[in-house]
Amino acid sequence: MAYSTIPKGSLYMNTKIYTGTGSAMNITGVGFQPDMTWIKPRSVVDNHILYDSVRGVSSRLIPNLNSAAGTVSDMVTSFNSDGVSLGTNGNVTANGVTFVAWNWKGGGTGVANTDGSVATTVSANTTAGFSIVSYTGNGDSNSTFGHGLGAVPTIFITKKLTGANESWGVYADPLKTFVSAVNTRYLVLSNTGSYNNSSTVWNSTSPTNLHFTGGDNIANSAAPMIAYCFTPIKGFSKFGSYFGNNNSDGPMVYTGFKPSWVMIKRIDGANDWCIYDNKRDPFNVVQDKLVANDSAAEGDDVALDFVSNGFKFRQNGGNFNGSYQYIYMCFAENPFVATSGSDAVPVTAR
């Protein structure tokens, strides 16, 4: 059984839904002070936006675009003890528009890290397996960057903060199910494409428990960079892979916990990065889909059930259950078993 020291996933990753008022507003009830907040309008076409506590609330990123970080001070205006404050920008508070905010708890204010050959500033939460890494690249193919996790990151996402048309690079260890030499492959968060082959992006070098390697503009341009690093925590997060069967009785993916949030990507062809969560869909079937690579409004897929120990597909479809290869990121609502010993009680399904 998947015992966990994290009895409640929402202590470290939590989703909030809200409706904009057209005015500045506070989003509360997150349960912690976020270090990364990712917001998407649901009911209208508009961009994703992402802020983190290391870059600060004046620096906006757009996950569905390759654009540079923008100085936008009227979106997320502060990270608070129980959520975030939002300004008057319609991308986050348009009147009558429904929104979702996905929040992660890092390590608070960034601290200096010298575990790599290039100094970084890191906000790391080793309990939850998440860190935010800020650094200025040097363009050298074999430079390394400390991530602060104390464990090998399974997935990390990198972005150059300056210049137009700079891709979001994704290192994904779950690719090893399907390909050899994961460290010569990468995905792009902001497009639908399959994995790319490159010996330079990660310099054909796998990450370690101390650092990752960057080799070109995706991970080590001679410019300011940001990276979001994740390592799996038993009962709280899992990053894996599965084969779809193109059947309404789809595969069951075991995670060892009841999911609260999942992002899925087909890796052998062009399909979206599909995101589902337990707040937009509090009951099964989970079908309210947003896609990380597009500004589209929320759509419906009769896709999957969140169950007590994983997720089960209830329909076929190229985005999540065709006869294809997929990877996923998943975070817990609750572990299947919260603690070890006599007080261990399995959670129930929805």
Image: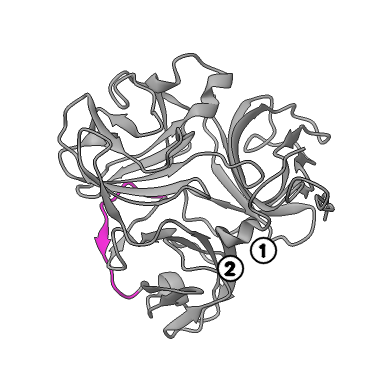
| Foreground of the two, 182 or 151 | 151
Kindly identify which residue carries mark 1: 279
Position in image of residue 45 (x %, y %): 49, 62
The amino acid beneath tag 1 is Lys
Task: Kindly give the residue lying farthest to the front in the view shown.
Answer: 342
Instruction: Kindly identify the residue that appears in the image at 47 percent across and 68 percent down.
Output: 33
Asked whether 188 falls inside the magenta stretch, the response is no
Residue carrying label 2: 16
| Magenta stretch: dominant secondary structure | loop
Q: Give the range drawn in magenta.
A: 64-74
- Left or right of 262: which side holds 128? left
Quadrant where the C terminus is found in the figure: bottom right
Say which residue appears at 51% left-offset and 61% top-offset. 103
**Position above or below: 128 against 212:** below
- Asked if residue 324 is positioned above or below residue 5 in the image, the reply reads above
- Relative to 107, is 113 on the left or the right? left
User: In the figure, is residue 63 to the left or right of 5?
Assistant: left
Circle 2: element type: strand
Quick check: is 65 in the magenta stretch? yes
Q: In which quarter of the image is the N terminus?
A: top right
Give the residue displayed 50% in from the left and 28% down from the top: 173
User: Which residue is depicted at the point 43% across and 86% down?
Assistant: 23
